[in-house]
Amino acid sequence: MGQQDGDAAAAGQPQSVPVNMYEAERALVLVAPLPGVMVDDIEVVVEGRKATISAAMRSSAPKDYLLHEWHYGPYERVVDLPDGFGGKSEATFANGQLALRIERGPASDGQTVAVIHRP
């Protein structure tokens, strides 16, 4: 995370989330690291040709840090989806990583995807 993201987090604005995206058999898969986030604090929406990942990290008590590079606060990322992906979607969360699987199909009008915790 860069200084700009840290400043945004300190101001309560969403920080960007890095993602990896690849095509699997009959589906597109997005993987995003969300360390320190609880599954109940994640929201995933697939609408049209966009997938939006939002998450909140619960804040800790204020401390007098000697070094402070890891910021609490909201995360958000909107990813443009390639043509042909907009079908049924499922999301799982395990070991601090969110995996979103979007099947081939027409773009949806909008669906909130339930995130399933996988211990």
Image: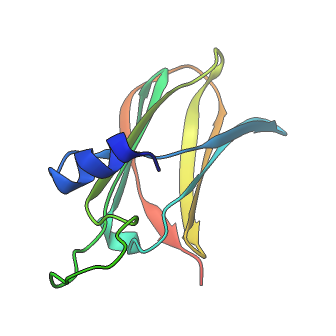
Residue with the most extreme front position = 66
Residue 109, visible in the rendered structure: yes
Foreground pick, 5 / 90: 5
Picture residue at 25% right of the left edge, 47% below the top: 7
The image quarter containing residue 98 is bottom right
Q: Is residue 95 above or below residue 72?
A: below
Q: How far from the left and from the top, in percent, is residue 80?
A: 52, 23
Q: Position of residue 91 (x, y in %)?
A: 54, 56
Residue at 76 percent across and 37 percent down: it is: 22
Q: Position of residue 65 (x, y in %)?
A: 27, 79
**Which quarter of the figure is the C terminus placed in?**
bottom right
Q: Nearer the viewer, residue 32 or 45?
A: 32
Q: Residue at x 41, y 39 (%)?
A: 77
Pinpoint residue 3: horizontal percent, then vertical percent.
Answer: 37, 46
Front residue of 119/25: it is 119
Q: What residue is shown at x 59% (from left), y 77% (from top)?
A: 118
